[in-house]
Amino acid sequence: MSGDRHPLFMPLIFVGGLIFGFGLGFSQMARPEVVLNFLQFEDFGLLFVMFGAAIVSGIAFAVMPRLRDSAPLTGDRYERRLKSFDRNVLIGGAIFGVGWGLSGICPGAAYASLGVGNVAILWAIGGMFIGAYLQGAWRSRRATAERPASSAD
């Protein structure tokens, strides 16, 4: 994160997190049993919450670049950053889905679940951190192995 951010940048992120966590708690999406019921096609409340969030975000992403050239707090220009659909996205999405189904919670909701008193979710949060660390170590090792050895003449 660059040091030339607006002074309200970090407090605004905090307020955004408060709103996000409150919304997840209020909509009951921070409860693993609700998420598991969705994944078993028994309760579609999560689907409506996701659609509602996608609609609000979509409107913001469509309108803001027309109103301003850059983000008000960061100064970054609005531009599309698309991730290509490749093998890594497919495999990573499948692994994420298995973890989501086994734990009944996705990363953002895990912290909100902790906030509503689900202390057992610490196991899932710990697993997410360890899994992300292992993936990063694996990727670093792989990148090092793929680099051609430089010759010292």
Image (cartoon, rainbow, N blue to C red):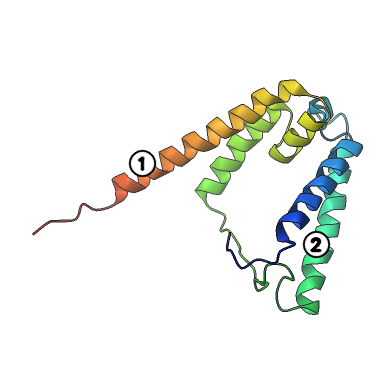
The N terminus lies in quadrant: bottom right
Amino acid at dot 2? Gly
Residue 87, percent from left and from top = 51, 48
Q: Residue furthest top?
A: 120
Residue 141 circle label? 1
Q: Earlier in the sequence, mark 2 or mark 1?
A: 2
Q: Residue furthest front?
A: 7
- Three-letter amino acid code at disc 1? Arg
Q: Residue furthest left?
A: 153
Q: Are marks 2 and 1 in contact (CB under 8 Å)?
A: no
Which class describes the residues within 10 Å of circle 2: few (<14), some (14-19), or many (20+)? few
Secondary structure beneath disc 2? helix
Q: Is residue 17 left or right of residue 95?
A: right
Q: Looking at the picture, how far across and down is residue 74, in whole percent?
A: 68, 67
Q: How many marks?
A: 2
Q: Nearer the viewer, mark 2 or mark 1?
A: 1
Q: Is residue 74 left or right of residue 24?
A: left
The image quarter containing residue 67 is bottom right
Return the residue nearer the eye: 58 or 128.
128
Residue tagged 2: 58
State the residue at coordinates (79%, 78%). 66
